[in-house]
Image (tube, rainbow, N blue to C red):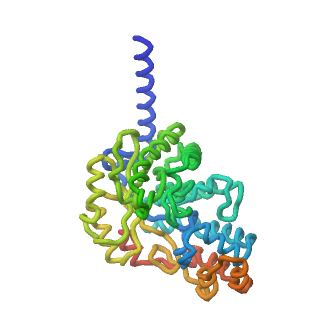
Amino acid sequence: MNKLVLIILSLTLSLGLQATESQGKFVHVQGVNLIRPDGEKLFIVGTNLGNWLNPEGYMFGLKRTNSAWMIDEMLCEMVGPDFTAKFWQGFKDNYITRSDIEFIARTGANTIRLPFNYKLFTDEDYMGLTAKQDGFARIDSVIDWCRDNGLYLVLDMHDCPGGQTGDNIDNGHGYPWLFESEYSQQLFCKVWQDIANRYKNEPVILGYELMNEPIAPFFDNKEDLNAKLEPLYKRAVTAIRKVDTNHIILLGGAQWNSIFTMFQDWTFDHNIMYTCHRYGGDATTEAIRSFIDFRDKTGLPMYMGEIGHNTDEWQADFVKVMRENNIGYTFWPYKKLDGSCMMAITRPAEWDSIIVKFSETPRGTYKEFREARPDQQKARALLLQFLENSKKENCSPQKGYIKSMGLNY
């Protein structure tokens, strides 16, 4: 037997052992289905922990101030940087805790999608810290809570270096610079490799969702940008596979995770799947026909990572459609101010007249900062009240919403 044959046999054996290990301990892809370690099919049903590690303005009742950096800037102008840092620490401590995960598990959910900002794994200024970010500590906690409650976890990079979307949801600056910046792409791959290296042996994690809703539909050059999506996905998958061959990697389509026509190669990795989003429209099979057709074309699973913000009746109808068509789902979001979620935060008294009003007031000059700034004692007290109200025990479960998700309450 010559040397080349021995090398090929060795590589084949190695890959076979890796595949066996993956199938033995981890959820893995098998055709259009996900298979649990016990060999049974996993149909994803759950929710998103949106706003917690990637703040969005509307979940605080804000409109113009609608991304994390804008919220942070507004808070610094209103109550100062030190109090703002204190607020963010309290927010991360209170907004999602073990009791939230226990509640989600009691409804019958089996999966949580965790959106996060890449800055949680760098030394950039984010949510009150400028170094020694706590991203791993936060995810470690969620993993422990999920393990204790029988839940799987999808890690979703909602905010990528440079911005992958070009709208407020990526916490960027209005354009998907990620696709035109070599530095940002290197950082994107590095952060994912760091995450994968830490969690390569963690079976609670279902998979890594490389980026959320890439390339908004607003850009005249969106077709050119779309063409860059699959090559960047392949580059990131290569970086991840250098350290982790166990976990599924999830790939979202362009234009709000709705367009998949730019994907031409779905055989480059042994354990990938695709993820779509849907808000509004008809609650019918035809409304998601393109997702079903792409799933059937590739022979790989399709998962509805985000759906929601509609009537209970519409949501219940769409759940029926997704179940009939073998598309698992996680509703958006688990918790926010007022409602349209599983767990509603009560709006503090005077929140609108002080916090929201300041956020809407023009603040383009220092003079405008000074003139718009509210009474410090009242503003700080309101922010602390929001933190208190956001604790699970002080929130209001939305029974109709939960039931519309196909869950129990």
Tell me which corner region of the image, top left, top right, bottom left or bottom right, holds residue 388: bottom right
Find the residue positioned furthest to the front.
220
Q: Where's the C terminus, which quadrant? A: bottom left
Can you say whether 359 is above or below 144 in the image? below
Residue 161, image x, y percentages: 57, 54
Residue 341, image x, y percentages: 46, 74
Can you say whether 254 is above or below 344 in the image? above
Residue 30 appears anywhere in the view: yes
The residue located at (63%, 82%) in the rendering is 358
Q: Which is more toward the observer, 112 or 242?
A: 242
> How many labels sit on residues?
0
Q: Where's the N terminus, which quadrant? A: top left
Find the residue positioned furthest to the top.
1
The residue located at (44%, 58%) in the rendering is 215
Q: Which is more toward the observer, 132 or 354?
A: 354
The residue located at (45%, 28%) in the rendering is 14
Tell me which corner region of the image, top left, top right, bottom left or bottom right, holds residue 218: bottom left
Residue 376, image x, y percentages: 74, 83
Q: Is residue 341 left or right of residue 126?
A: left
Tell me which corner region of the image, top left, top right, bottom left or bottom right, holds residue 82: bottom right
Q: Which is more toward the observer, 266 or 172?
A: 172
Can you say whether 240 is above or below 296 in the image? above
